[in-house]
Image (cartoon, rainbow, N blue to C red):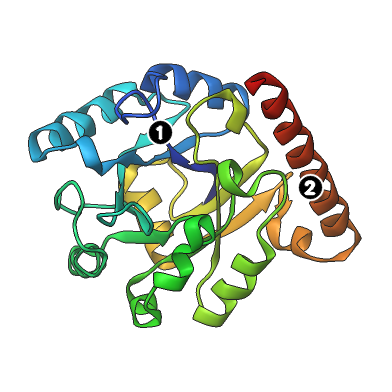
C-alpha cells in the first residue's frame, strides 16, 4: 500500500477564470510536497474534442514526481450547484442537469463530489436522493470557506452519510493552503490515474489540514481559534476592498 498527498479542485488556464499552465501548477505543488493534482476545469467552455485534448495535456504535464489527473467541474444552468467529476466519464455538455451528471458518473463508475455546498446556498437546492451517486462533500473549500472548515458543511456531510473532502478551488496563489487529500493506493509502484481514481471510488482517502485530520479543526479549541482567525481575515479583506473602491 502507498499513501500519497493530493490537492483537489485545481483550475488551470484551461478554465475560463484561471491562468496558470498545467506545468507551472505541477511544479508549484511539487515544491509543496504534493504528488497528485486532482484537476477540476469548468465544463462551461469545453467540448468533447477539447476534453480529449485536455486529457492528453494532463498526461504530458505529469512527471515522475507529480501526477496530473484530469477532471471537470459541472454546474447547473444558473451556476449554483457544482459537481467535480473524475474518472472515465465521457464529456456530458457544458451545463448539463445535475441529476444527469450524477447518473452518468455512476454508470461510468466515476467519482462525483458536491463542491462548496454553502456557496450561494447550493445545499438548499440539493436533492438528498442524489447522495447515493456522490463520493464525498467538500467541507472545506479554501476559496469560499477561507482559513477554517465550514462547520455547517461538516454536519451536512454527516447527515448525508458521505465522507468529508477538502479542496483548494485553486485559481492562483491566493488559494495555496495546507489542505490535502491523503489517498491510500494499492500496490507499491508510482501513482497512476487508475490507482488514484480507484482510491477515490473506494473511499480510501482522508481529508487533511496541516497534515492532520481536517475534522479536528471543525470543533475544539483549535477549531475555534482557526474560525476566529478566518473571521478576522474576512473583516480585514472587506475593509481593504472598501478602501480600494474609494
- Residue toward you, 214 or 156: 156
Q: Is residue 20 left or right of residue 181?
A: left
Residue at screen point 77% across, 58% down: 217
Q: Which residue is mark 2?
A: 231
Rendered view: 23 above or below 236: above
- Which of the 4 quarters of the picture holds residue 216? bottom right
> Which is in the foreground here, disc 1 or disc 2?
2
Say whether disc 1 or disc 2 marks the residue closer to the N-terminus.
1
Circle 2 residues within 10 Å: few <14, some 14–19, many ≥20: some
Residue 183 at least partly seen: yes
Q: Is residue 79 left or right of residue 174?
A: left
- Which of the 4 quarters of the picture holds residue 29? top right
- Residue toward you, 8 or 96: 96
Q: Residue furthest left?
A: 49
- Residue toward you, 147 or 135: 147
**Mark 2 residue element:** helix
**Mark 1 residue element:** loop
Circle 1 residues within 10 Å: few <14, some 14–19, many ≥20: many
Residue 185 rendering spot, x and y as whole percentages = 46, 53
Q: Which residue is mark 1?
A: 11
Rendered view: 139 above or below 143: below
Image disc number at residue 227: none
Residue 136 rendering spot, x and y as whole percentages = 46, 65
Q: Is residue 208 left or right of residue 118?
A: right
> Contact, CB < 8 Å: mark 1 with mark 2?
no
Quadrant assignment for the C terminus: top right
Residue 62 rendering spot, x and y as whole percentages = 36, 26
Residue 155 rendering spot, x and y as whole percentages = 63, 74
- Which of the 4 quarters of the picture holds residue 240? top right
Amino acid at each position: 500500500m502507498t499513501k500519497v498527498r493530493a490537492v483537489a479542485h485545481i483550475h488551470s488556464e484551461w478554465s475560463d477564470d484561471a491562468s496558470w499552465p498545467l506545468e507551472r501548477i505541477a511544479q508549484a505543488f511539487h515544491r509543496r510536497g504534493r504528488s497528485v493534482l486532482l484537476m477540476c476545469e469548468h465544463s462551461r467552455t469545453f467540448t468533447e474534442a477539447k476534453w480529449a485534448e485536455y486529457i492528453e495535456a494532463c498526461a504530458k504535464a505529469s512527471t515522475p514526481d507529480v501526477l496530473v489527473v484530469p477532471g471537470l467541474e459541472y454546474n447547473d444552468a444558473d451556476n449554483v450547484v457544482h459537481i467535480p467529476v473524475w474518472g472515465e466519464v465521457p464529456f456530458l455538455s457544458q451545463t448539463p442537469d445535475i441529476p444527469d451528471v450524477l447518473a452518468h458518473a455512476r454508470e461510468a463508475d466515476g467519482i462525483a463530489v458536491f463542491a462548496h455546498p454553502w456557496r450561494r446556498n447550493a445545499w438548499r437546492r440539493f436533492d438528498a436522493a442524489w447522495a447515493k451517486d456522490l463520493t464525498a462533500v467538500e467541507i472545506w473549500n479554501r476559496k469560499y470557506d477561507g482559513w477554517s472548515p465550514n462547520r455547517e458543511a461538516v454536519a451536512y456531510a454527516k447527515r448525508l452519510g458521505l465522507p468529508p473532502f477538502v479542496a483548494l478551488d485553486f485559481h492562483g496563489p491566493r488559494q495555496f493552503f495546507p489542505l490535502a487529500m491523503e489517498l491510500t493506493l494499492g500496490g507499491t509502484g508510482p501513482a497512476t490515474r487508475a490507482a488514484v481514481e480507484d482510491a477515490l471510488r473506494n473511499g480510501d482517502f482522508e481529508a487533511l489540514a496541516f497534515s492532520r485530520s481536517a475534522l479536528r479543526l471543525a470543533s475544539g479549541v483549535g477549531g475555534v481559534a482557526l474560525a476566529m482567525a478566518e473571521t478576522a481575515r474576512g473583516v480585514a479583506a472587506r475593509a481593504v476592498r472598501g478602501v480600494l473602491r474609494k
